[in-house]
Image (cartoon, grey):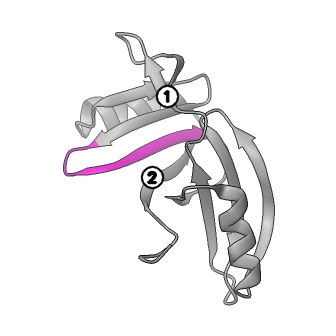
């Protein structure tokens, strides 16, 4: 952790009511390429970044920061004076936690300890790649 705990911005999440309409808007009309799709989320590429734009059914928004190990990162946040709001908990690709710093800025931490999405030709998630 000599250079910092946060490795990169993994994704920027946007809450939508309809995935198909959101894919038309962000994909067809605004030109973002589909990386992957599940029943409740879509990952789109941003051409000059590894960060994905993730459209999902739900009400939370904002950036997800990639860390090596979520449990250790959440513990480090609390030891530094922050707090855990939710988790850590399992997600499809690894582990996740929602934390807050001492000024109540909320940050979503995630790791890819289970792998990354593997997709078919249409972008549907068919499994995990290690």
| Residue displayed at 47% across by 75% down | 4
- Label 2, on which residue? 10
Task: Residue 130: give x, y in percent of width and height.
Answer: 49, 28
| Residue displayed at 74% across by 88% down | 81
Q: Please rate how many residues cluster around mark 2, counting C-alpha atoms within 10 Å: few if below 14, some from 14 to 19, many from 20.
A: many
Task: Answer above or below: position of 49 versus 21.
Answer: below
Task: Residue 114: give x, y in percent of width and height.
Answer: 60, 34
Viewer-side label of 2, 1:
1
In this rendering, the count of numbered labels is 2
Q: Alpha carbon of mark 2 to alpha carbon of mark 1: how far? A: 17 Å
Q: Please rate how many residues cluster around mark 1, counting C-alpha atoms within 10 Å: few if below 14, some from 14 to 19, many from 20.
A: few
Corner quadrant of residue 34:
top left
Task: Residue 94: give x, y in percent of width and height.
Answer: 63, 40
Left-right relation of 94 to 81 = left
| Residue displayed at 54% across by 59% down | 67
Q: Which residues are magenta?
A: 46-57
Task: Answer above or below: position of 40 versus 56.
Answer: above
Q: Quick one: SS at disc 2?
A: strand
- Label 1, on which residue? 130
Q: Observer-nearest residue: 103 or 24?
A: 103
Task: Residue 99: give x, y in percent of width and height.
Answer: 70, 69
Predominant secondary structure in magenta? strand
| Residue displayed at 27% across by 29% down | 28
First in residue order: circle 2 vs circle 1: 2
């Amino acid at each position: 952790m000599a250079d910092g705990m946060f490795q990169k911005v993994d994704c920027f999440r946007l809450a939508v009511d309809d995935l198909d309409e959101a894919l038309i808007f962000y994909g067809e009309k605004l030109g973002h390429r589909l990386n992957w799709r599940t029943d409740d989320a879509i990952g789109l590429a941003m051409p000059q970044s590894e960060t994905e734009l993730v459209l999902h059914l739900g009400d939370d928004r904002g950036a997800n920061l990639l860390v090596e190990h979520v449990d250790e990162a959440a513990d480090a946040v609390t030891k530094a004076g922050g707090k855990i709001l939710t988790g850590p908990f399992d997600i499809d690709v690894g582990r996740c936690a929602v934390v807050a710093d001492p000024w109540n800025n909320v940050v979503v931490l995630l790791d890819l300890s289970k792998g990354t999405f593997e997709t078919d030709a249409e972008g549907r998630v068919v499994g995990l790649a290690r």
